[in-house]
Image (tube, grey):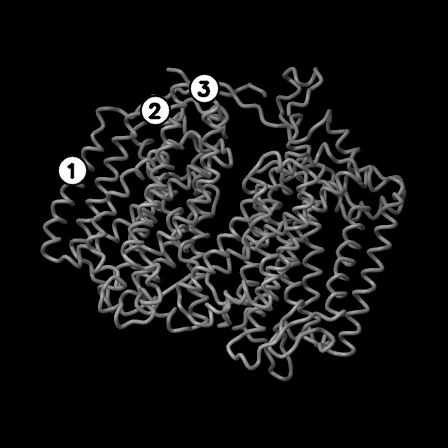
Amino acid sequence: MSQNTETVPDNRLVKGDHDFASITKLISDIPQERTPLWWYIAFGVSNIVLAVMIAMVVWLVWEGIGVWGLNNPVGWGWDITNFVWWVGIGHAGTLISAILFLFRQGWRTAINRFAEAMTIFAVMCAGLFPAIHVGRLWTIYWIFPLPNSMQLWPNFNSPLLWDVFAVFTYLVVSTLFWYVGLVPDLATMRDKVKGRISKLVYGTFALGWTGGNRQWQHYEKAYMILAGLATPLVLSVHTIVSFDFAVSIIPGWHTTIFPPYFVAGAVFSGFAMVLSLMIITRKLYGLEDIMTVDHIEKMNIIILVTGNMVGFAYVMEFFIAWYGGVEYEKFAFINRAFGPYAWAYWIMVTCNVVAPQFFWVKKFRRSIALTFALSIVINIGMWFERFVITVTSLAQDFLPSSWGYFSPTYVDVLTYVGTFGLFFTCFLLFLRFLPMVAIAEVKGVMPQADPAYYRSQNGNTKSTDDS
Amino acid sequence: MIMDHHHNTLSDRLTFPEDNRIATGFFAAGILGVVLSLIGMFINTEQFFYSYLTSFTFIASLVLGALFFVMVQHVTRSSWSVVLRRIPETISYQLIWLGLLFIPILFGMEFLYEWTRPERIATDELTRHKLPYLNTPFFIIRNVIYFAVWAALGYWLYKNSIAMDRSGDREIDRRQRIISAPGLLIFAYTVAFASFDWMMSMDSHWFSTMFGVYFFSMSFQAILAVVVVLVLYLFRKGLLTNTINKAHMHDLGALLFGFTVFYAYIAFSQFLLIYYANIPEETLWYYYRFEGSWVFLAYLFLIGRFVIPFVLLIGKKAKTNYRLLMGVSVWIIILQFLEMFWIVMPILHQGSISIHWLDITLLLAFFGISAGLFFRQFAKHSMIPKNDPLLAESLNKH
């Protein structure tokens, strides 16, 4: 009876000659080093851009929604496009931390902290748009079902309200998840930093963590529960965002595949954003041993899969638009591809469906330059997807006499650009002050974490990289 | 790699016992079903074809679900599933026969598909609009393509796996991945369009972009249940008890739990969007399926196919409680048949559930023959891919 008895050696997740101490040092040194010059420059630019966003928001609140390019048929324009785009980007973090955790994918440890931080900041950017779109920002609390003297309640039948709950829940759980994961590493920082004030701050947030057995048991349990809670949230947020469109009877919006299609698109753009940021960061901070090419390749596979899911949805929509035989639906799709917004449609198809097909080839999946370029291309494509969905269906709807065309004003453009200021301001602060890689978790996927490691030869001989 | 306390050799017998007569039993039941159904065909031809389509789609959904399972394991290079992969492999190998089973449907198209009826084409504008797609020759061509593609995928993946048992050639493992990755993409499109053709086009006005995903979500939940049942059957016969352990069953249970939620998510999203928009062309499909006593089945799916398995399987211990897993899985398989019944049958029996004896005999025929073919094939080779490169890792799963 012949039978395979050999084990295929796993690819090391952490490359190079690292042990626990060197991993701790690599990550925890970053916040302690002198702030690099590039950081000041980047932070300065982000602050200026953020200031532009604030100015635009103030101007909008002062003057009214009319400063945007919205017009009579197109009541939703860049605001909703940007909202959906940012929320979509915010999906990768929780997917990486929760779903990949439940699937026991060890490679997530290198990028989860990073992606979770990105998630929180992206959701903040997203939240801005519906908030300012209501026009009267000072009554924004009306979106919550608060008892009041006018017996005024939000419309519980509206997915726009479900969105409020979904996005807030997502923000809260994502933040908790991020913070719980940070606690052991904050304790590491507390033990490493020299300054008294920084010791106090890190120590306060580390909640008295000592790394005892009991603490780890509680920690693991809490992390598992949060992962279980966060997983349905990944689906629910973008599902409800898709409902914003799909429950209506607007041609091009009302289609049943929207929920899983939006979720796939969100993961697609989220992973692209994580890649864009990660490729720069790993270079700047010399983290190539932790965020390896293997990680990039795995993420590119997810991009390929989700990109094809999005492509599948495009095909289904187009086919059913014809098959259903509904006059308006047929028109909506022909109009998307060949009407006044055809340019946007074909940018979308090229960026989202054609571009990721490069990743069928292993060499391209492992090419850092190509990955970086495509990650940007994909996020451009995903922005256009939301733009195409939102605007084309509204601009040419049922009544030809009221057709219009949407052109953004400078306020539209600068508000959108400005959110990058908000995003990068937060992100740079994160890079500067917090351990950007989950130190404790990365150690858990190293060979040294195996209890038998030091009993076998591996402990004595220098291990060599096997990739 | 660290080798302490690990076991790398298989200690179970690897072949299905020859004195096991289960295949014969299933074949006997199947043949009985075939004979009775043939009699029924002359008594009530229309009912025959509806019952036939119900059982066909039931079996097809399982076999296709198995194909997806196998391809996903290859693409993700899963090690956990290696010890039980031969089961779905053998199921998806049955795709080579599936096309033959579809042929009788071609003779019943005028009963099943209103778009084939000349008087319908003459009077109904929408049917005329769909004529370039919904016409008999193109329908046949499409189905030939689907069955050819699936048969090729099922056949290759199985044969390669068997070849690896013999030679242990690692190159074959790489080839399995090369087949599976584009295989999944092809699978998505063919299954979606097949579900449109077989089931969605029965209500020729109705359309839903989600329908393909809906069909897939049911298939995958059901096949996971089938794999659970088969593994637990082998355990009862004392087979593979040292090879497949609690950790493997836990993962299978976790997947079953996950895809129970996925099924509910897809089925409910499709319903909610149609209910909310309330456009007559779309709501009609649900109207017939909620009419009279049919609505009980709809509630049964909500509670039986989502709420009950969700509650029962959520705990960690539940996923390794074999009695519970067996019960939930059998229940899900039954509901998969009933959901096919609920999709197909309200067109023939409007207003109230009506179970004809042909429903039973055709289910017997399909299930008996398919299960018989499965066990016959399963007995021919090793019950696990004994030379898979990831086998040792799979055996050591804990």
Q: Nearer the viewer, residue A257 or B247?
A: A257
Q: Which label belongs to residue B28?
A: 1
Q: Residue B323, image x and y in percent?
A: 35, 40
Marks 3/2 in contact by CB < 8 Å: the verdict is no
Identify the secondary structure beneath mark 1. helix
Q: Residue B311, image x and y in percent?
A: 43, 52
Q: Quadrant of the C terminus of chain A?
A: top right
Label 3 – label 2 distance at C-alpha: 13 Å
Question: In the image, B290: left or right of A248?
Answer: left
Identify the secondary structure beneath mark 3. loop
Label 3 – label 1 distance at C-alpha: 38 Å
Earlier in the chain: of badge 1 and badge 2, it is: 1
Q: Is residue A171 above or below residue B124?
A: above
Q: Which residue is mark 2?
A: B382
Q: Chain of mark 3?
A: A
* Residue B14 visible to the viewer: yes
Q: Which residue is mark 3?
A: A4
Q: Chain of mark 2?
A: B
Marks 1/2 in contact by CB < 8 Å: the verdict is no
Q: Nearer the viewer, residue B182 or B67?
A: B182
Q: Tell me the quarter of the picture where residue B203 sits.
A: bottom left
As drawn, which residue projects farthest toward the bottom?
A150
Question: In the image, A438: left or right of B321?
Answer: right
Q: Chain of mark 1?
A: B
Q: Amino acid at mark 2?
A: Ser
Q: Residues within 10 Å of mark 2 (few under 14, many from 20)?
A: some
